[in-house]
Amino acid sequence: MMTSSKDEQILCSLLFETTPDYSTNLQTLLQLIEQTNTNTLVLAHEVCLTGFDYENLEKATAFSEYATEELLSASVDKTVVLSMLEKTDGEIFNVVKVFHNGEVLHKRAKSRLFRLGSEEKYMRTEGSDDEFEIVEINGIKIAILLCFELRFKELWQKAEGADVILLPAWWGKARKEHFKTLTQALAVINQCYVLASDALNAECSALSAIITPKGEVEFNGNKPCLVKRYNKKDITLMRRYIDVGIK
């Protein structure tokens, strides 16, 4: 565990497997969160608690309600970001949530469904780009791209100016190189930190990582929780050194 001062911010990308047992997945997540210090920004992969369990959507969405209450408690003095399957007005959505200090500070539905994986057959309505926003927490401006959204340049533009861009993903192993290239490019073009969290499941890339404003990449490898100190100066210096107009 990395020790930190009271005001120091820590970034943490997670890497673990989503099993068929929802409760096991939640306990894994809660244990990893508990291992982190206060003032840690923790990112877990897309639908990490249930996976895309399309055959049991009622069960999955009900579990999301239960898990939300658990994560509210787990997020005291920390920030936890993940996506989960939720039902709203009878429709299923893949919703990214930002838990902070016992509250849900931000949530939005995935705005680009992955048709190669038939996501649109089960989530018939996409979220709106109008809900995309940069959220400031403890002085850090945070933007989130949810998996397939990484491929859309108009969403990159909406993320411009963020200090940290988060990417919770369930990214196919067959497109592993795309994930590496796009996440690194995202950090370089925005001159900011990028946290990527992918699942350890066999079909996924497992390329959880933290990328610096210089584009330097550190992958989790065999670490369930990769941590790095957040340094605002790294962003400021990079944007001053190569000025491309990002404020």
Image (cartoon, grey):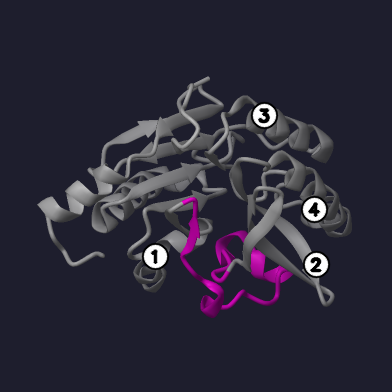
Q: CA distance from mark 2 to mark 3?
A: 28 Å
> Could you give the CA–CA distance between mark 1 and mark 4, rounded to whole angstroms?
27 Å
Is 124 a magenta residue?
Answer: yes
Which quarter of the figure has residue 58? Answer: bottom right
Residue on which the image places disc 4:
64
Determine contact: label 2, label 4, CB under 8 Å. no
State the mark number for residue 89.
Answer: none
**Circle on res. 159:** 1
* Mark nearer the viewer, 1 or 3: 3
Question: Label 2, on which residue?
Answer: 87
User: Where does the image place residue 73, in percent across and percent down from the top left?
Assistant: 76, 42
Q: What residue does disc 3 label? A: 34
Magenta-drawn segment: 111-138
Horizontal side, residue 179 vs residue 189: left or right: right
Is tag 2's residue or tag 4's residue first in the polypeptide sequence? 4
- Which tag, 3 or 4, sits closer to the chain's start? 3
Q: Are marks 2 and 3 in contact (CB under 8 Å)?
A: no
| Disc 2 crowd, CA 10 A, few/some/many (<14, 14-19, 20+) | some
Residue 63: where, in percent of width, then height?
Answer: 85, 50
Please say whether residue 86 is visible from this viewpoint: yes
